[in-house]
Every structure is written in C-alpha cells, then in structure tokens.
Amino acid sequence: MSLDKAVERGKDTSLPPMSTALVAETNGNGNGTGAAPSNASYRLRLNPNQDHKAENYDDLGLEFTPLLFSSLERYLPPNLLNVSRDTKYKYMRDILRRYSTEGERTRDQKHREYRQKIISNYQPLYRELYTLNPSTFFVQSFSKAFSANDKNRDESIRSIMSEPAPGIYTFDMLQPRFCDMLLNEVANFEKWVHETKFRIMRPNTMNKYGAVLDDFGMESMLEKLMEDFIRHISKIFFLDVGGYSLDSHHGFVVEYGMDRDVELGFHVDDSEVTLNVCLGKHFTGGELFFRGVRCEKHVNTETHPEEIYDHAHLPGRAIIHRGRHRHGARATTSGHRLNLLLWCRSSVFRELKKHQKEFVNWCGECKREKQARLQQSVTAKKMELLVGQPDGAAFNLR
C-alpha cells in the first residue's frame, strides 16, 4: 500500500474534519473593533497573543466545541481581547459559520453529544488525572526545564533533549506513578465499555485497539499540556511546520501485543507535531522506525541512508517529531505495549500550506530537488562562461 493511502487510513476518525480545516481559512491580520464589524470582514490574527488568558466556554450551549473558542480567542484582534465573552463568542462563531457547512456542523454536534454521553455515564478511576498537575505528572528534569525564567527557558528545554536523528527529539517526561495510573484508567474505561456494550470510536483508522482520551473527559487536560508545554517545545524545534501556532489536538492511547494491534504500517500522522510517550508495560519489540520527512507530493519517494533511524521505547520517555516524518512500528513480539499519543495541529500552517508548491524548509525531497536545480544552474553557467572565452584562455572555474 502506498504511503498516501496510509495517510488517509491513519487519520483521526473521532473528530469531524471541520475542526482544523475551517479555522485555517479564518486566519489573517484583522482590525476588529469592540462593536464587532460586519460579518464578512471578520478576521483573526496570524499569530496568537501568548500572554492572553482565554475564557472558558464550557457552560454555553455551543454549536462548536467549547475548546475551539478558547483556542481561537488568542487570535482575536487586540481590541477584542478584553470585550465581553458574549461579544467574543459571537465574533468567533460567525467566522466559524462562514467556513463550515451545515453538514460539518451537524457532524460536530453529533460528536459532542457522543462525548457528553460517555462523560455523563463513565465514572473515572482517578479524577486527578483529568486536571494537569506538573508536580505529579512529570519527572523533575522536565518540570525544572520549564520553570526557568523567560530568558533562559529555551536553553533549559534544549538541555534535556537528545537528537538521535535530524528532526527527532527524545527526553524523559512522565513519572512511573502517572504512567501506571493512566494505564489503569484506560483499562477501567475499556471495562466500562465492555460491560455497557457502548460502541466507541477507536483512535484512528489504523489502530483497532486503544482509546481516545479526549472522548472520556481528558480533553481540557491535554489541551493544557499542548498549550503550556508541547507548543513551547515546538516553537524551538518545529517552527517550519507551524510549531508556534499549534491550536488543536487529538489525544489517545494505543495498545500493542500479540492479541492486540501487533504492528503499525509505514505512514505519516494527521498532525504538524506528534508527541509519543511509552507508558509500559512489559514487552519486547515494537520499535519505531523513521524514514525521512516528506510533503504530500513526495510521500512515496525513496529513503536515503541518512534518514534511517530506529527508536526503542522506554516507559516514561517521550519522542517528538513532525507529523510528516514517515514512520511505522515493528511487531511487538511479547507482552503488551501502550503509548500515549498527542497529535498537535496548526490551522494557520494548514492554510499557509495551501498556497505553497515547495516545502524546502522541512521536506527532504523538496530540498534535494532544489539543490539539484542549483547544481544544474551552476554547471550551465560554467559552460556558458567557458564557451564565451577566447582560445587559449585559462582560469579556474571550480
């Protein structure tokens, strides 16, 4: 199967496509006013106001996901940031309506009802997992890196990272106790699903086992994880794929074993940046293999030796990479392996990408094609100069 088909198979099936694509259409440099201009002129800013504290929209009966409004609020024009929540809500709602079809809104509404039905009936095993707490979630080195002052934070984060291959970073992240609790929570959720015969959506079209954490109440926790930690890492290492503007996510746990998903085929993720953290348990095999970053046009091109990297999982240790970094998972030959995945997306980057033909900043094959064109141009210029020289002239053109 070709990789472009694998992209389609590997997409998130738990959220309607509207949730990221339509936001992308709205991003621009707007000049909104507190009284909100005519609907057709509504715009969002290209870059978010990172210092703005967004409001909570969970209590409103919304036709779009509440967290979408909290994420979008940071992109409002400056003179709309401090108006009433109702004014901000109407401004953002009208933008979203402009770029979504009624079918998409209906699909989104059905998914919210699906989530609400689960959350209303499922009883969490550990409620403390549903609110992000760095002191109980993260290992000391990870928390310490982010506690550095603004001037030194980037360097502090770099200091805990290893880069075993270009564009792939690994670091210690989660405490053993947190990993155990999350594993038990997922097992408890699966038990509830079995007992109630509730039909759930699996993480994506390639994984038949695992659970979408957002669907049973962890959406807000994972949103904060992305906003406060993963987005900062991505601003340092993945600016070229919108790391500065990650604004939505898909969070889930996958499970591998001889009686589960055994392996995962070669694919790319439906994300700009992917966080992957091994939770345990005891297992052999299951290594990730990476084979270079590619745009849609070049997704099936050959792999070059310098792009080959294999990664062995260790519980609590994270790996982070571009979603377009081609990869797969080898067979888990014994035991069970569970991993936490967070697909982070940027609606701004997805919109900008529509207007580009080449991606030399991050696609390995686009870079090679550009280098080949430059080499051809240099060679042609040399030949032109040589042809234009009188007989017997000699100078070095190397």
Image (cartoon, grey):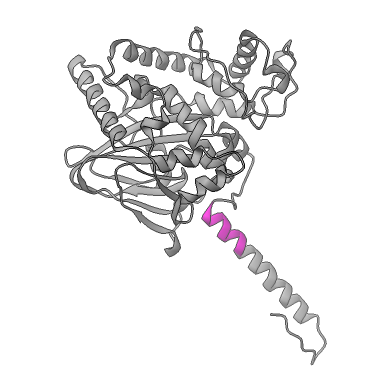
Q: Nearer the viewer, residue 371 or 274?
A: 274
Q: Position of residue 189 (x, y in %)?
A: 25, 22
Which residue is most to the right?
390
Residue 269 visible: no
The residue at 64%/25% (across/down) is 75
Tell me if 362 is positioned left or right of 343 in this view.
right
Tell me if 224 is positioned left or right of 328 in this view.
right
Q: Position of residue 184 (x, y in %)?
A: 24, 28
Position of 397 relative to 80 (above/below): below
The residue at 61%/10% (across/down) is 85
Image quadrant in which you'd find residue 260? top left
Position of 355 relative to 394 (above/below): above
Q: Position of residue 216 (x, y in %)?
A: 34, 20
The mark tally for this picture is 0
Tell me the magenta residue range.
363-371
Position of 382 relative to 185 (above/below): below
Tell me if 27 is positioned left or right of 177 in this view.
right
Residue 45 visible: yes
Which residue is most to the bottom?
392
